Every structure is written in C-alpha cells, then in structure tokens.
Amino acid sequence: MLKQTTILTAAVLAGAMALPATAQEKTEFKVAWSIYVGWMPWGYLEDSGIMDKWADKYGIDVEIVQINDYIESINQYTAGAFDGVSATNMDTLSIPSGGGVDTTALIVGDYSNGNDAVILKGEGELADLAGKPVNLVELSVSHYLLARGLDSVGLSEADLDGVINTSDADMIAAYATDDVQAVVTWNPLVSTIMEEPGANKLFDSSDIPGEIIDLMVVNTETLEANPDFGKAMVGAWYEVMALMAAGDEAVLTAMAEASGTDLAGYKAQLASTEMFYDPADAVAFTQSSDLPTTMVSVAEFLFDKGILGEGAPSADFVGVAYPDGSTSGDTSNVQFRFDTTYMQMAADGAL
C-alpha cells in the first residue's frame, strides 16, 4: 500500500484554500480508497451494495471511488474533491492536517502488524544495511519504519549509502535488478518479494505494533454538518467487519481477487494485520494512552524530514485531539481529531 507523505503541490494548496469556511448540509458524498489488505472492504462495500443499503437508511448517497495512486487520493481529498479518504495516521497528519484541512479519523480500521517490512537481498541483519542503498517510497511510512529499525540497532539514515525514492508501482521490478540491495515496502508487495530466493526480512511493523495505523478519515466540518454521513459509513463498515470476522469465504475471496491475490494469499496478509473487527476494540485502541505517544513520535519524524506542513516551526505545529479531550501539539491549531463517537454507536448497536 502506498502510504506516501509529500509536500502539497500548489494546485492542491489552492484547492484546499478554496474550500468553504463552513461545510453545508448535503445528501451526496464521495470517499476515496486505494488497494491495501485493510482497505479492501471499501471496494466490497461499493460492489456488494452494502454501502447503498446504509446510505438509503439515512436518506443520502455515498459513492466509494478506488484511486490507484494513493498519494493522489489524499491530495484530491485535501483539495476538496472527496469528503473522506483511506489514509494512515502519518499521512493524515502531514498532508491534509499539515495543509490546514481539519480532518477526523472516523474509523480506526487496523494497524499494520507485519504488513510493512525491511527486506534485504541475501543474508544479513539490520546492522548490515550500513553502507548500502535502500529503495523505498521516500517520506512514507516505509521511511518511518526504516528509521525505527535503524534506531533499534544504533544506526541512522546517515549510515546508509542513501535512500532511493522508488514508487510502489516499480518496487517489484526494482527488486529484481542487480543494483537493488534492500527495499522497504508493504503488502501485497512484501508477499510477492518474499517469494524471491534469498529475500530476507530484517524488520517489520510487528516490531513497532500500533504505530502504523490505517484509517478512514473525513473532513471534520462535513461530518459535523452531516452526522448521517458518519452513521452510514460506520454502519456499512462494521457490517462487512462482521462478515470477515465470521470467515465468510465469498466475501474474503471477492476482496482477495480485487487485490490481485487468492483467498490463501489474502488470509496471509490479514494475519499480519491487526484488524479491529469489533468496534469496541477500535474504540479501546483509540482511547488508549499509547495513541498520543505514537502521534508525538510520528510528528517528530515528520518535522525532522521537513514535511509536517509548510514552514512548520516545530514538531508541535499541528494539534491532534483525542477522545478524552486531550491534545498533543499546538492546541490553537488542532487539525487532526481521533473521535470514537460513531464507532461507539456501532459498538452500542445504536446505528
């Protein structure tokens, strides 16, 4: 899954600045998603009619659009083309929130528990990356994972022979070339690369559990003006979560095929994904005291790389609000909100 953090283009910034100061009540909504094991339910929701059923219940229309380029989906959301988008916690903080678009994590769907990995071609350990180039999507959660891995063995990026920015679309082909010695990427690319002889996984997201979080985020003003949008989205999501938790093979097979694998392959990817099938589990995770610690760490990484919003003076530039009312970062610039209201409604059977 391409989870890239990037500096907003002038066009995106212009689009974001053009957003209305106050969102209006409306009945038609669009959300974007991209291919990743934990986000395949969004495609199934659209194709199966489950989203339509829940939207009809609340008298609205929700269109779910697959975007092949993940960073483009977030940029389009930031520019106002979509009301919501599937994104990681890190990318939400840096792109829409860092760009001044107040954004709410409506659904905390999962955290990567092995889906993101540092892979060396041949024998060795993390320390053996010293002096080697590493291919990854620069300024992404792959970059973050590499930094966390290097730190665990007393190394830093300065000890490498540089990082080489490589798109997710080119990663498998790049790995096959003689020049590439190590890569950092995510599933389903990890699974494909690990099938190659000599592929050696050195570090993965299970070594930093709960830090790479996969979300459905929505525009805060739109959600506040249109609570039925949140109810329909969350209700539909957890209907599919129940089917997945029950092991419905027809549902899982549809998701597997849509992601380019088979049922066994998709189940293997789910095994390295901590899915929150039960909304109560998602609520508990979001209310945990660990989440602010993670977000502070992510903000520090983004600031260190110079991508926490244009001209950010410190790692505290963007305020992040949590369900208990606490915040990290600048309390006068809260642009990212973790809100358990709708997930709690699902847990209570109140949708």
Image (tube, rainbow, N blue to C red):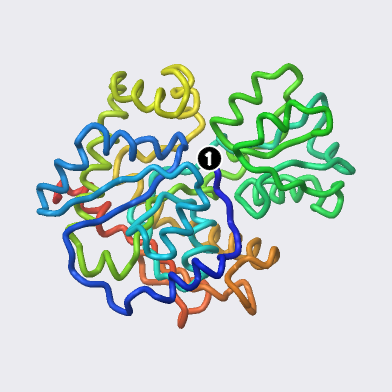
In the rendered view, tell whether residue 273 sits above or below residue 296: above
Q: Say what amino acid the circle numbered 1 marks.
A: Met
In the rendered view, tell whether residue 97 sits above or below residue 333: above
Total numbered labels placed on residues in the image:
1
In the rendered view, tell whether residue 93 sits above or below residue 170: below
Q: Which residue is mark 1?
A: 1
In the rendered view, tell whether residue 84 sits above or below residue 40: below
SS of the residue at dot 1? loop
**In the foreground, 13 or 60:** 13
Please provide percent x and percent y for residue 157: 80, 52
Q: Splitting the image into 4 quarters, where does residue 257 fall? A: top left
How many neighbours does mark 1 have within 10 angstroms: few (below 14), some (14-19), or many (20 or more)? many
Judged from this view, the residue extending furthest toward the front is 11
Identify which residue is drawn at 52% across, 52% down. 71
Please provide percent x and percent y for residue 32: 37, 49
Judged from this view, the residue extending furthest toward the right is 131
Please provide percent x and percent y for residue 25: 18, 68
Identify which residue is drawn at 76% across, 46% down. 164
Identify which residue is drawn at 27% across, 37% down. 45
Would residue 108 be found to the left or right of residue 239 on screen? right
Please provide percent x and percent y for residue 188: 54, 30
Identify which residue is drawn at 78% across, 28% down. 177
Judged from this view, the residue extending furthest toward the bottom is 332
